Amino acid sequence: MKTVIVDDEPLYTELLSRKLQQVAPDIEIAAIFNKPIDALVYLRQNPVDLLFLDVEMPEIDGFAFLD
């Protein structure tokens, strides 16, 4: 299963990445983004199965990101 992590706080993306590797090694982390705009560009061209998305981010919140 291919996934992407999007959170404006690098500490949380690193923690989530490490936890996922420990508990779900079958999940492939395709990319990690701390800037939601960069994630949008990536996701338009690279489909994934699972998205970990922070709701409160300064540039664009998680709900606007999904729209």
Image (tube, grey):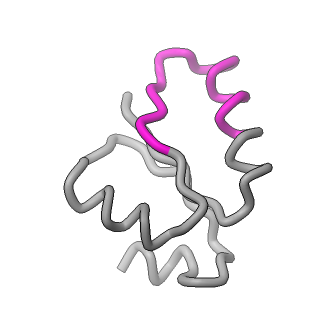
Image side of residue 60 versus residue 55, left or right: left
55 in relation to 28, above or below: below
Residue at (60% x, 60% y) in the render: 34
Quadrant that contains the C terminus: bottom left
57 in relation to 11, above or below: below
Quadrant that contains the N terminus: top left
Q: Is residue 39 magenta?
A: no
Which one is in front, 59 or 24?
59
Give the number of callouts: 0
Q: Position of residue 27 (x, y in %)?
A: 48, 25
Q: Quadrant of residue 23?
A: top right
14 in relation to 21, above or below: below
Q: Quadrant of residue 41?
A: bottom left
Residue at (64% x, 28% y) in the render: 20
31 in relation to 54, above or below: above
Residue at (36% x, 67% y) in the render: 40
Which one is in front, 15 or 52?
15
Q: Position of residue 56 (x, y in %)?
A: 68, 76
Q: Position of residue 38 (x, y in %)?
A: 43, 65
- In the image as oriented, which residue stretches furthest toward the left? 45
Residue at (47% x, 17% y) in the render: 26
Q: Which region of the structure is painted magenta? A: 16-31
Q: Is residue 29 magenta?
A: yes
